[in-house]
Amino acid sequence: MTWILLAIMVLATVVADILQSHEMKQAGVQKPNARGLVALLQHIARRSSLILAMVCMAISFFAFMALLQRAPMSFAVPASAATVILETVLARLVLREKVGKRRWAGALLVAVGVVLLAR
C-alpha cells in the first residue's frame, strides 16, 4: 500500500504541475494588482485543465497524508522527489521546454537518491 500511495501522489503531482504550467503559459503574465488577480481567476474558471490540476493537487495531498500514516517521513518526503524526474522529462517532451545539461544532471542525482531511499 505504501508504494501505491507514493505512486498516486507522484503521478497526481506531476499531472497537476504539467497542466498548470501549460495553462499559465497560455494565460500570459498577469499584473500584480486586483485586476490582474480577477483576470487570472476568470482564466482559471474558464479552463477545465486548471480545474483538473486542482483536483490532482487535492488527490496528491490526501495520498501524501495517507502515506505519512504508513511510512516514516524520512522516506515519504524524499521519495516524493520522484516528481522532479518525471516533470523534467515531461517538461521537455510535452511542454517542449529547453532542459540544459545541469538540469538533466540534477534530475539524475535526484533519481539516484530516490533509488537509494527505496532500498
Image (cartoon, grey):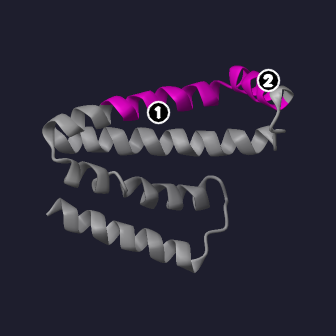
Q: Nearer the viewer, residue 94 or 107?
A: 107
> Residue 98: horizontal and vertical position, in percent?
67, 67
Residue drawn at 79 percent across, 23 percent down = 38
Along the horizontal axis of the image, is 7 left or right of 21? left
What is the quadrant of the N terminus in the image? top left
Q: Say which label, 2 or 1, has the lower sequence index.
A: 2
Q: Residue at x 46, y 33 (%)?
A: 57
Amino acid tagged 2: Val
Q: In percent of the image, x 29 and y 55: which residue is there? A: 79
Q: x and y percent of residue 72 in the render?
A: 16, 47
Whether residue 118 is in magenta: the answer is no
Element on which disc 1 rests = helix
User: Is label 2 in a helix, a strand or a loop?
Assistant: helix
Q: State yes or no: residue 54 in magenta.
A: yes
Amino acid carrying label 1: it is Met
25 is higher (above) or lower (below) than 61: below
Corner quadrant of residue 40: top right
Q: Which residue is mark 1?
A: 57
Of labels 2 and 1, the one closer to you = 2
The span from disc 2 to disc 1 (Cα, nearest Å) is 22 Å
The percent position of residue 35, horizontal first and vertical second, equals 85, 27
The one of 12 and 31 positioned closer to us in this rendering: 31
Secondary structure that dominates the magenta span: helix
Q: Is residue 76 above or below residue 101?
A: above
Q: Which residues are magenta?
A: 36-62
Please name the residue that numbered disc 2 is placed on: 38
**Disc ID at residue 77:** none
Coordinates of residue 7 in the picture (x, y in percent): 30, 44
Above or below for 89 versus 25: below
